[in-house]
Amino acid sequence: MVSLIPQPLDVRHAGGHVSLTGVTVRAHGLDEHAAARLEDLVTRLLEATLPAGAGKPDVGPPADLPVQLRVDPSAGPDGSTSDERYSLVVDADGATLSAPDAAGLLHAAQTLRQLVEPVPASGGGEPTARLPFVVVVDAPRYPWRGLSVDVARHFSGPEALRAVVDVLSAYKLNVLHLHLTDDQGWRIESPSRPELAKLSSDGDCSGGKGGHLSLADFRALQDYAAERFVRVVPEIDVPGHINAATHVYGDLRPDGVPTDAYTGIEVGFSRLTFDLPATEPFLRDVFTDLAHVTDGEHVHFGGDEVLTMEPDEYARFVELCERIIREAGKTPVAWQEAAKAPLRPGTIVQYWDTHKADLTYLADAARAGARVLLSPANKVYLDMKYTADFPLGQEWAGLVELRDSYDWEPEGVVEGLPPSSIEGVEGAVWTERIVTTDDLFTMLLPRLSAVAEVAWTTPERKDWEDFRRRVAVEAAAWRRDGRAFHPTPQVDW
């Protein structure tokens, strides 16, 4: 029985297996440079699954399995228009992966990676591996399948973020949303405002040294992510969560006095003031700078937890941020509170706060043309504790165990929300109480794999008991790669 996460749309077993001692990967239908990059990446993904030695013969040529990557517009399930759809066939002749473009080919390769079955050594020989004969036809449910990572409260540098990208790619997630600024730190260089990263990035919530991404770091991260078909969505959070900026610029405050640095975890106390002369130039500088260094289509302007501002002033901020970001050539994204203000069609609003009973404003915004990204805190905020006595995380949104992240239906989250307005699903991990990379992955895994299945798999293909079995199998890859994870008692590891 194969163990695939997320569960594909259709899996047909043909019976039988083919031995796997090595792979020869060839890409067809891509330009030379793209083909070489994809061949190298897929080769490394598959070779990492093989046991040491992998049963290579002592004499004669290695019996590498042919893996063909083919661009084919007809690949995938009938009726799907997703560019990420794919088909996969494994038989005695090897593995053929087909997709309309390279993103689908990598998704197919991640599926092939999970199909590799170890074969224990016998008779004094080396352990080997095999692939089952199988046909997989697959496509995603939603186009946006992501994870938001807060690097403002505790900074995660390029190496940790690359590791996050690897895990996103492994489960066919395609967005890394970076929460780059908050009261505690400004974590991205801004050429127009170099003082921000210079003066507001050298601390964090636990007295550490902080840090920030240089423009070169951000460029390299985007390139690394793009090779794995993950797009980076950067966020500068305004008009609240802004103490890191007012610490540098007193002219962003009515009294003209810069604020003190902040290392606590409270929210809602900081804000910009719309009518100050410095406010609009500041917003234009930081968002235009960010848009110009962002490859993807989207820039996030925050908008959450502005607790001391009147609705009219808040609406003016939303309109201005939308306008600046669109003038810079990007599509705006904001947290759900922005839907209380008039929005331009196509703006994405991100639902998070499950404590709010009346969400008619969100449904109304969707009917008026906004897109909705679902991040319900009591399901996919992966910094929430697994259990009350868990040593990491918080619990203001409740306890979030693996099954909580798995057993929910996006179309049932917001009453009255048109299903056609749902852009996708995004997990989030906030880092007030998450310090190290191991802390981060302990909170992400295994729950991120559950979020991936919610975002990719149709409801009728989901099955909690089967997912429990599959995630236990997938944990072997985490152990192999040295990833920290929480061995929740909900799974028989």
Image: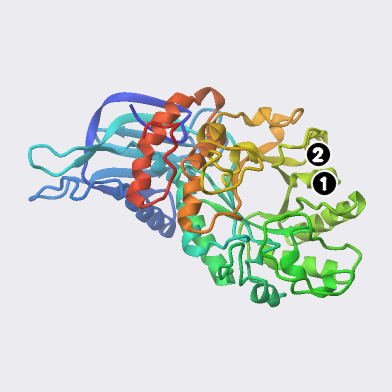
Quadrant of residue 298 in the image? bottom right
Q: Front-most of 47 and 251?
A: 251
Query: Residue 207: x and y, percent?
Result: 59, 67
Above or below residue 348? Residue 317 is below
- Please name the residue shown 45% across and 52% down the image: 166
Describe the colour scheme in one phrase.
rainbow
Circles 1 and 2: CB atoms closer than 8 Å? yes
Seen at 62% across and 43% down, the residue is: 395
Q: Is residue 228 among what the camera can see?
A: no
Which residue shows up at 50% across the image and 64% down it? Answer: 158
Label 1 crowding class (10 Å Cα cut-off): few <14, some 14-19, many 20+? many
Query: Would you say 302 lies left or right of 67 here?
Result: right
Q: Is residue 238 left or right of residue 108?
A: right
> Dot 2 surroundings within 10 Å: few (below 14), some, or many (20 or more)?
many
Q: Judge left or right: residue 297 versus residue 47.
A: right
Q: Which amino acid type is shown beneath numbered disc 1?
A: Leu
- Residue 175 x %, y %: 57, 49
Tag shown at residue 343: 1
Residue position for label 2: 365
Disc number at residue 217?
Answer: none
Instruction: Pinpoint residue 173: horizontal percent, then vertical percent.
Output: 52, 44
Quadrant of residue 5 within the rendered picture: top left
User: Amino acid under label 2?
Assistant: Ala
Q: Is residue 70 left or right of residue 242?
A: left
Residue drawn at point x = 8 percent, y = 42 percent? 124
